[in-house]
Amino acid sequence: MICSAAMAITPRTADELLRDVPVIKDLPAHDIHALAEGAEVRKAAKGAPLFSEGQAAEGLFIVRTGEVKLTKSGRDGREQIIYLARPGRPITEGLRFDDGNYPATAIAMRAASALLITNEHLLAIGERRPTILRVLIDLMAKRTQKTLRLVSDLSLRTVPSRLASFLVTLVAARESRGEDSRNLVRDLTTETVAGRLGTVREEISRGLALLEREGALKVTPDLIEVIDLSRLEQIAYGRKKGGSES
């Protein structure tokens, strides 16, 4: 398992939750309230889908409690995790006005709930308030940008490089929350990390062993200790992050 502590967040009102969502939070208060008025709560038990690939797309989801993974599965059963959405984060794959379907599946990694703002409601208020439609376009563009970055990583970078980048990001996230960023309790399964990085658990195990041999980590069954963050960044990015090109 690999670490990523996610603290439970007490459910908030739709208005409060939307005020924390990137891009949407920049809307005027009356526009945020107009969005919140059309929101309904959807729940999913651990391991159950919030929605499934191929179903009719319903609208914009905002995770309220728990954690949801966006995933696609290959014919061979291998899973690719596109991203993880925690409380306050949007799921945009169902946001469309062409009567299309979900292109991926959203599964609760633990019991989860989410706000759903339907496409019908979004279109109705968007026609009266074009600023809302512009914000939705920006939200989808940011998701597309991140997805393309994932495609680039999967196509062009090695597993150890992707794993090192994942750990560097994890360290930064823990630092931003004031948590211990060098001793990573392994509470994300190897399978989950493999899914996020587009590989299999055996490759993750080999990647961890390589990063340990390189002096970046110390790995035990219950802990990953970051020994040399600069070395980890060098493996992740080809040079020390923020350094000059040689």
Image: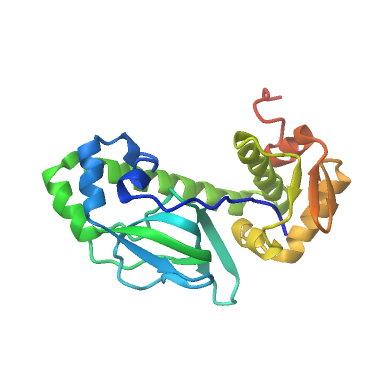
The figure's colour scheme reads rainbow
Q: Is residue 68 left or right of residue 91?
A: right
**In percent of the image, x 49 and y 71: which residue is there?**
45
Relative to the observer, which residue lies in front, 150 or 208?
208
Relative to the observer, which residue lies in front, 90 or 38?
38
Image-quadrant location for residue 42: bottom left
- In this rendering, the answer to whether 76 lies above or below 155 is below
- In this rendering, the answer to whether 65 lies above or below 48 is above
**In percent of the image, x 74 and y 59: which residue is there?**
204
Image-quadrant location for residue 130: top left
Residue 112 appears anywhere in the view: yes
Estimate the x, y position of residue 146 in percent, counting from the top left. Answer: 48, 46
Determine the residue located farthest toward the left in the rendered image.
Answer: 128
Relative to the observer, which residue lies in front, 56 or 238?
56
Estimate the x, y position of residue 179 in percent, counting from the top left. Answer: 67, 39
- In this rendering, the answer to whether 137 lies above or below 59 is above
Relative to the observer, which residue lies in front, 133 or 121?
121
**In percent of the image, x 59 and y 53: which residue is there?**
155
